[in-house]
Amino acid sequence: MLSIDDLVDRAEIIDVLVTYCTALRTQDLDLFDEVFAADAVIDYTETGGSRAGLEATKAWLSELLAGVRSFELFVGDSEFDIAHDRRSASVRTTWHGLFVPRSEGAALQVYGHYQDQLVRGDRWVIAERVDHPTARVVASLDPGEG
């Protein structure tokens, strides 16, 4: 049975994941400063990016998002392994996203999972993230939608 502390930790970590999705959906990458530790290592090599620090990752994502009209990102199930001292956690979270390009072209649905190492100081933040996309599906949009 989970304790109140367990539930609070899980809720706070889920808030971190939701803020991450909000940052990408709104293209407000400054929100990443609330999500990631200043010295975080973020590995997007499987999605065409690099394994880099926070500022380099924000720069890469900024370029990527410049070509996207809409990016809807959703997190799903999370598996939590919170350390006994409650100062660190390993969390695996499923995700799916819909990328709609600014130019003509097909939308893309992508599915995968994140493997995150989080640490807690004043709040939970991601210290290391590895993105594991598992499937890409070309999506069609109704021409009347926009």
Image (cartoon, grey):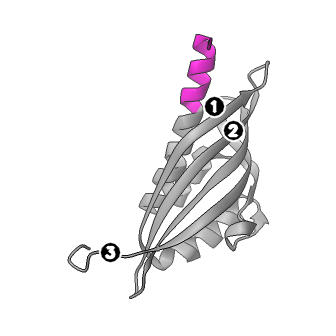
Mark 2 is surrounded, within 10 Å at the Cα level, by few (under 14), some (14 to 19) or many (20 or more) other residues, namely many
Q: Are marks 1 and 2 in contact (CB under 8 Å)?
A: no
Picture quarter containing residue 116? top right
Disc 3 or 1, which lies upstream in sequence? Answer: 1
Considering the image in quadrants, where does the N terminus appear? top right
* Disc 2: which residue: 91
Location of residue 56 in the rendering, given as x and y in whole percent from the top left corner: 71, 67
Q: Is residue 28 left or right of residue 32?
A: left
Q: Are marks 2 and 3 in contact (CB under 8 Å)?
A: no
Disc nearest the viewer among 3 and 1:
3
* Disc 1: which residue: 123
Residue at the limit of the structure toward the left, as seen here: 144
* Disc 3: which residue: 141
Magenta segment, which residues? 1-12
Disc 2 or 3, which lies upstream in sequence? Answer: 2
Residue at figure coordinates x 20%, y 77% from the top left: 144
